[in-house]
Image (cartoon, grey):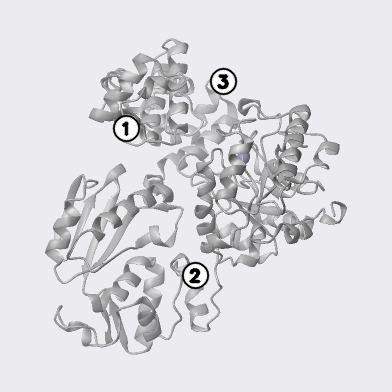
Amino acid sequence: MTNADIASTLEQIADLLEYLGENPFRCRAYRAAARTVSGVTEPLAELRRDGGPGLAGLEGIGADLAGRIAMLIETGRLPLLDELKAQVPAAAADLLRVPGLGPKKARLLIDQLGIDSLESLEQACRDGRVAAVKGFGEKTQHAILRKVAFARDPQRRRLLWKDADDIARDLIEWMRRCPQADRVEGAGSWRRGRDTVGCIRMVVASQSPAAVIDHGIAWPGAAAVLERVESATRLRGPKDTEIAIVVVTDVAFGAAMVVHTGSRAHTDRLRECAEERRLVFDARGVVPIGGEERPATSPPSRSSATEEDVYANLGLAWIPPELREGRDEILRAEDRRLPALVRLEDIRGDLHMHTTESDGDAPLAEMVRVAISRGLEYIAITDHGPRVSMANGLGPERLLAQWEEIDRLNASLAAAGPPPIVVLKGVEVDMLEQGGLDLPDDLLSRADWVVASLHYGQQQPGTQITARIIEAMEHPAVGVIGHPTGRLINRRPPYEVDMDAVIAAAARTGTFLEINANPWRLDLHEIHAAAARDAGVGLVISTDAHSTAGLDLMRCGVLQARRAGCSAADVVNTRSLRELRALMKRDGSRRG
Ligand SMILES: [Zn+2]
Ligand SMILES: [Zn+2]
C-alpha cells in the first residue's frame, strides 16, 4: 500500500464523515492526515517496519489515527471505511468522484433530486433540474455537467506514467533475475512515455518460455493470473494494473519490441510499409509475404533481432519510442528527417520550484544544495505570491527578504571562484480572477524570473480565462506561463482555455510556455507543446518541485517534450544562463 493509497483512503473517510454531517473537527483531522501522508516521501509501510517513533511522530497524526493507518497497511482494509460506506447511498461515492462536488452538494443532489448515479446526474444537469436546487444555479450546473463527463471517462482508470514507471522498473528488475531470461525490456505506452498507462508490457527473449512465465507469476507484485498461454501471460499487478509478459526467441526480439511498443496506429502503418515491400511482420519477425505460415519455431528470414534491423527491413530509420504514435513519424523516418530529441542530460536549469517560505517542504539552502548535486547550473526560486494565501504565499516584504537571502547565498557560492550554481530571484505570481497580477509592477521588474500561473477562478468561461492569460503575457516582467491549461490528470479537466490564442500571444509577446514536469500535470501536454514549438514559442521544462525529491521529476517533463518531437534547441532551459537571458523578452542587457 503506497502513501498515495493511504492518503486517498483517509480523504475518502473525511468525505463520508462530512456527507453524514459528522463533527467538522473529525473531518478536518482526516483531511489533515491525508495531506501529511501524501507529503511524506518515505513509504509509511517502511517507517513502521523500522520500529522508530513511527506514524504517531508525524505532524497532525495522533495515536488513534496512527493505529488506523497501521491497520490499513497491515490488512489493506479499514472497518471504519466499510461502516461509513454502509451508511451512505451507493451513488454518493460516485458523485464524490466528480471534481469540485463536495459532500454537502452531493447530499443535496441525492436528497432533493433522487440522483442515484453519474448518468442520472448528467441527465438532471441537461434538464436544468440541478440549477433549480437552492445554492446551485446555472453556472454551477454547467461546471458539474463538464466534470461529470470527466468522472465517467474510462481513461481515468489508467495509471499515471510515474506510478506505472515504479511498477515497471520493479518488474524488469525481477524478470532480469530469471536465469532463463536472456533479455528483458519494458514496452507499451510506458516505454512511449505516455502521460498515463493502461497495461504494462514486458518482452523477454528466452529459449524456455514456461520457466520465464513461472518466474513472472512468482513476482511479489502479481495479485492474480488473468491468462496464461504457451509463451505469454497476463497478470493483475499492484494498483489493479494489467501486466502482460511476452516471451519470444532471441532472433525475433527486435520485432516483438516494435510490435509491443508502438500504438495501434503506428504498427498498422508499419504493416502497410511492409506490404509495399512484399513483406509481413509480426512479433515473430519479418518474413516475405506467405512466409508467415512457417512453424512457430523456425527463425524469421529477415533479420529481426534488433529494432534497427526491423525498421531497416521496412526502409525506415529507427524511430524513438516516444514518437511511435502513428502521426508523421513514419514519413519522417522514410526521409531521414526525425528530430534529435531533447535528453535529460541536456537540461541545465530548473526554473520553477518552491521552498518552505510558501508550500514547499525544504528550505532554500536545502533546495540549492540538492540542485547542485543534480548538476544544475542555475535554478529559479519561485514561491507563490500573496493570492495563494492557502500556501502561505509571499507579499512584497517577505519576497524582498527572500531575495536578499538569495543575494547572500549567491555571493557565498561565488566567494571561492566560479559558483557551482546561480540562484535566480523569482516568484510564481498569480493571475487574479478579475485580471492583473498579485504583486506590484515595480517589484516584478526587479525579479530575475517570473512565472505567471492561474490557481483561482478556474471555472470561469473560456473567453475570460484566455483573456487573463494573454494579459499576463503582455506584462514585460512575465517570462513564462506556468502549467498553462491547469489539468490534473485523472482529477481535474483543463480550464476552458483557447490554446490557439494563448500560443499565438506567446509567440507575439516572446513569452515562454511551461511543460510542467509534475506527473499529475504534464502541462503543456505533447500536442500543445508541439503546436507551441511550431509557432516559434520557447518551451521551459520545469519540475515545480515542492521538495528536494521533486527535483528528480524533470525526466517526466523531458518525456513529454520528447513526445512533442522537441529537440534541445526548442527547450530554453537547455541553454546556458547567459543564452537564456538573451532569449528572454526583457533581455539581459540591463543586468549585464
Ligand atoms: Zn502553480
Ligand atoms: Zn508552482
Question: Does any portion of residue 425 appear in the rendered image?
Answer: no
Q: Quadrant of the C terminus?
A: bottom right
Percent x, y for residue 195? Answer: 46, 53
User: Disc 1 marks which residue?
Assistant: 45
Which residue is depicted at the point 52% across and 21% down? 133
- Vertical order, 510 against 307 (above or below): above
- Vertical order, 24 against 436 (above or below): above
Taking depth in this image into account, of 142 and 81 the one nearest to the observer is 81
- Name the quadrant containing residue 259: bottom left
Secondary structure type for disc 2 = loop
Taking the image as four quarters, which one is ligand 2 found in?
Answer: top right
CA separation in Å, label 1 and label 2 = 43 Å
User: Are the residues at dot 2 and dot 3 in contact (C-beta closer than 8 Å)?
Assistant: no
Secondary structure type for disc 1 = helix
Which residue is depicted at the point 34% across and 54% down? 169
Percent x, y for residue 529? Answer: 60, 59
* 157 with respect to 218 (left or right): right
Q: Residue furthest top?
A: 23
Question: Does any portion of residue 39 appear in the rendered image?
Answer: yes
- Vertical order, 586 against 299 (above or below): above
Taking depth in this image into account, of 222 and 267 the one nearest to the observer is 222
User: Are the residues at dot 1 and dot 3 in contact (C-beta closer than 8 Å)?
Assistant: no
Percent x, y for residue 411? Answer: 75, 43
Q: Amino acid at mark 3?
A: Gly
User: Disc 2 marks which residue?
Assistant: 327
Secondary structure type for disc 3 = loop
Graded by Cα atoms within 10 Å as few (under 14), some (14 to 19) or many (20 or more), the crowding at tag 3 reads few
User: Disc 3 marks which residue?
Assistant: 135
User: Are the residues at dot 1 and dot 2 in contact (C-beta closer than 8 Å)?
Assistant: no
Which marked residue is nearer to the observer: mark 2 or mark 3? Answer: 2
Taking depth in this image into account, of 512 and 506 the one nearest to the observer is 512
Q: Amino acid at mark 1?
A: Ala
